[in-house]
Amino acid sequence: MTTMQTSPKVSSELVRNAAGRMVPTEVNGRPQTPFLGVGAYEPDGDKAAPPIRRCADYPTNGDKRVADLRTALEKCGLRDGMVISNHHHLRNGDRVALEVLKAADSLGVKDLMWFPSAAFPCQAEVIDLMEKRVVHHIEGSMNGPLGDYCSQGKMRGMGVLRSHGGRWQAIQDGEVQIDIAIIAAPTADAFGNCNGSHGPTACGSLGFALADSMYAKHVIVVTDNLVPFPCLPWQIQGNNVDYVVEVDSIGDPSQIVSGTTEITKSPDRLLIADYVAQFVRDAGILRDGFSFQAGAGGVALAFVGKIRQIMEETGVKASFVRGGSTKQLVQLLQDGYTSAILDGQTFDLDAVRSIASDPRHVPTSPFTSYNYHGKGNFASMVDVVVLGATEVDRNFNANVNTHSDGRLLHGIGGWQNCLFAGCTILAVPSFRDRLPVIVDEVTTYTGPGELIDVIATERGLAINPRRQDLLDAVKGSDLPIRPIEEIQAEVEQLCGGKPERPRLSDEPVAVIKWVDGTVIDTVWKVES
Amino acid sequence: MTTMQTSPKVSSELVRNAAGRMVPTEVNGRPQTPFLGVGAYEPDGDKAAPPIRRCADYPTNGDKRVADLRTALEKCGLRDGMVISNHHHLRNGDRVALEVLKAADSLGVKDLMWFPSAAFPCQAEVIDLMEKRVVHHIEGSMNGPLGDYCSQGKMRGMGVLRSHGGRWQAIQDGEVQIDIAIIAAPTADAFGNCNGSHGPTACGSLGFALADSMYAKHVIVVTDNLVPFPCLPWQIQGNNVDYVVEVDSIGDPSQIVSGTTEITKSPDRLLIADYVAQFVRDAGILRDGFSFQAGAGGVALAFVGKIRQIMEETGVKASFVRGGSTKQLVQLLQDGYTSAILDGQTFDLDAVRSIASDPRHVPTSPFTSYNYHGKGNFASMVDVVVLGATEVDRNFNANVNTHSDGRLLHGIGGWQNCLFAGCTILAVPSFRDRLPVIVDEVTTYTGPGELIDVIATERGLAINPRRQDLLDAVKGSDLPIRPIEEIQAEVEQLCGGKPERPRLSDEPVAVIKWVDGTVIDTVWKVES
């Protein structure tokens, strides 16, 4: 590892990690391990754990309600510099996280670290709270305006982006100690048992909040649908909860789940979905008892439709499919094409209804699905996963966080964790806005090419040369299997050359964590 | 606290605790806190936690099977002095625990601490393994022969008896660090996900094994019903499991659950059940949304029948009932007399079928129900609980562990934890084998009288004078409410005087833990 002096903003030095990226050795006052390679880092020590509590300090009748958020925060001993966590199941409809931070502001505290599982545009006002020094910085996926703010170097601390599994790992391993966790609960009882599957603002699973509820020093449940004890099912256990706050509304249902999830209509993207489904068949991955994961993007949904068609034709059935769940997956379950949906998040109303009523539609958590510092997880047991990316490079490395202009606009989600599937396919258009997606070197290195097996574009599929088995498997196929360099060259010709490199400063504004907590890349301040 | 010198067996001194009992200050090499009074002990520090693991060390395809128990134990690094845990859901039909300890013997290890949630007569052969020095001592409920062996002072270490909640507390607080946990699973997949609700040896809930799976350094799942991933529901998560072992049979179904649970036919006991049900009605406890817990004993079952009758007459419905679940509780659920069964263990086949199929019949764990070092638990939210005892005294203190001859023959179960219910009723015959059950001073002090509200016998009900509210509530009732001393005197006259005091040595052989981990009493070696 070579080292260099860092900018004035970051006091630590930078080192070159195993991915060849310069990363800081200290972030927000905590020492960091640079990425050492896939599977190379060996953690030691014991998991973190919250303080021991005792029933004598909680109401005997189980009624933990307090008047409002402000009271709950006061009772939790809110003070300067604390770590406040939220989860993002209410997506862009969330009305809780911002209220919590505003309540903290009204109590006069400063320098909080906000630790959402993801932030959405509806929380853009957190920028004002950062300007007012109420929030010091954000560690969490920052979609849209907050990411942009971070990109401009305006946050006082560094952004830290983690995958869903990496967030569990960081909490579990004690890298992040949550002082106060806020659980926005579509249904809850006064003891704090709660779920996301029922109620007027139902969002399905509450899995991203599970670690927060287990490891935080203090836990507040906020609900707009209080039911008599016992709230069933209890996705979050009241035994981990300190206070319950009733509010009129935790979110805008129309922004929490979509009424329906839409399959892409773009002919190019439908073609990609076709290619991917055909690849899964021709490579021999589609066989009885196979499993797959595809998200809720347009291409992924089209892929599910195509793979269903092949399953119908061949009579092959899946043992399980992984959500993000949608109507398409629910129909597979109901029609007998899969035995189970193992669901990380629930994207549309059909999926919410299914998870609330069908025991084969199971809410999962990043612990079961993604945590790399566990005794295995579900991600590596999935036969094939179809993901996206903002950029891929000739070594199959990929970027999902920054745009080609270097701006940090997306979180990692479960993307890094899913790379451990039996076969990882990135389904990407070959260009966007006349910019080639296949580049010489990704702007941000979110995932190592050694875990990425296929790049599927509308101009053909590139198979990673490391996967000779896949290359062999599709030898007789009529799929347009092509070297990645060939697709790249073709697209560059079409778009008028290689994309311009982004204008980046040498000032780190955020780091990208790998699934094991090591630092895989740095996000640099964008020159304005 | 006064102190005295202890016997040669125990190196520590004895002190008088807040219950007035002499207890050792050190047990099995660990310092102890004497009982300080209900709610008086304030724990500090953080919960315990197991070592951080990583996926790189576990099979990518999720298949954790190994050839046999011996192999699994070797892979877990079994060595002298380790702590091996088992759970008791297979009750007297268990075929796993003994096999594990025998496999350990075959590997030549010595001085194990065996930590079952409870031991049954089918495990009496552990006595041989203690004689062979394979097992050093047992911490856990010892029903029957193992308790007797302990009573005779033959165990090399001290017995430590904990309630179900106390066992969770001890694991959670790090008092007991389990090296290898064994989960006997009626259904499991190769990843280690498992449940007790399905399969030929189904036992219902696996709640007692949950703490073991979460906190142990190594976890082995043993099953006779391997199913394809994912095993649903996963009461125990494979993400906590290291190895899976397939065996022909984990237990004898006829001894695991009874085909049917029998209501008592004894007229005296039926009368007690009548009194208790009438008390619950007359004291105003029976009202819409009330809750109760009663076990699977003959009187408890008769009580459930009586209370159902009153519910039918009055139209009152329960919000929840707590199991140990039986056909009687299942019928309440199915007939709409309760909204939910919150189930700690599943006693008969009807209950097993119900927990496997009805989402309102919920498996619980000692964490949700009983752990005193949590943010509340279910036990204190139960309006009325009907329990038994081997002895009660004039101060309402009670004994469930030893017989009047001083022999340790029973575990604590959830008994101590249940004392926190709104109203605790001990339903006991006034004498057994011509020995009065109400004594001047209990042989073993398992639970403080301040938490025991009513002693119900066939000769009348004694209400604890601390509960003036209950005394007032039943003023107009035709129930035979009597001072405890009066019942005691009547029974002594009948039985020919007070029972003889047991002949006990001054040698401690076991301690009884209170729900907070403090030592509430000592069990003394029985003079033979």
Image (cartoon, coloured by chain):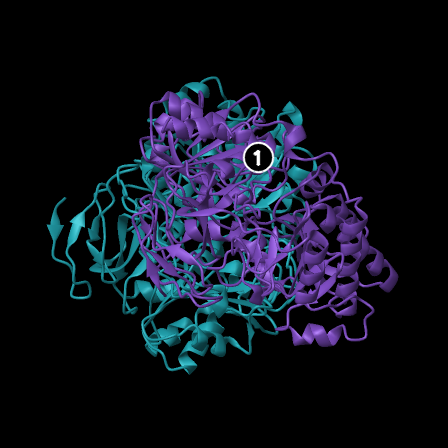
Chain colours: A purple, B cyan
Q: Is residue B280 above or below residue B498?
A: above
Q: Secondary structure at mark 1?
A: loop
Spot occupied by residue A22 in the image (x, y as percentages of width and height):
41, 57
The x, y position of residue A413, in whole percent, is 56, 48
Image quadrant in which you'd find residue B462: top left
Tell me where residue B27 appears, x and y as whole percent: 24, 59
Find the residue positioned furthest to the front: A496
**Amino acid under disc 1:** Cys
Residue most toward the right?
A: A313
Q: Residue at x 37, y 62 (%)?
A: B147
Chain of the residue that carries numbered disc 1 in the rendered image: A
Residue A223 figure quarter: top right
Q: Nearer the viewer, residue A77 or B43?
A: A77
Q: Quadrant of residue B497?
A: top left
Task: Left or right? Give the position of B216 relative to A420.
Answer: left
Give A501 or A468, whichever is nearer the viewer: A501
Classed neighbour count for the residue bearing mark 1: other residues with Cα under 10 Å, few (<14), some (14–19), many (≥20): many
- Position of the N terminus of chain B, as image quadrant, is top left
Q: Which residue is mark 1?
A: A231
User: Which quadrant is the C terminus of chain B positioned in?
Assistant: bottom left
Give how far across and how far down residue B410 sits, in percent. Answer: 40, 55
For the point 51% across and 56% down, which residue is it? A445
Describe residue B90's horizontal placement relative to residue A106 as left or right. right
Residue B415 in view (yes/no): yes
- On screen, A514 above or below A132? below
**Residue drawn at (73%, 65%), measured in percent from left and top?**
A289
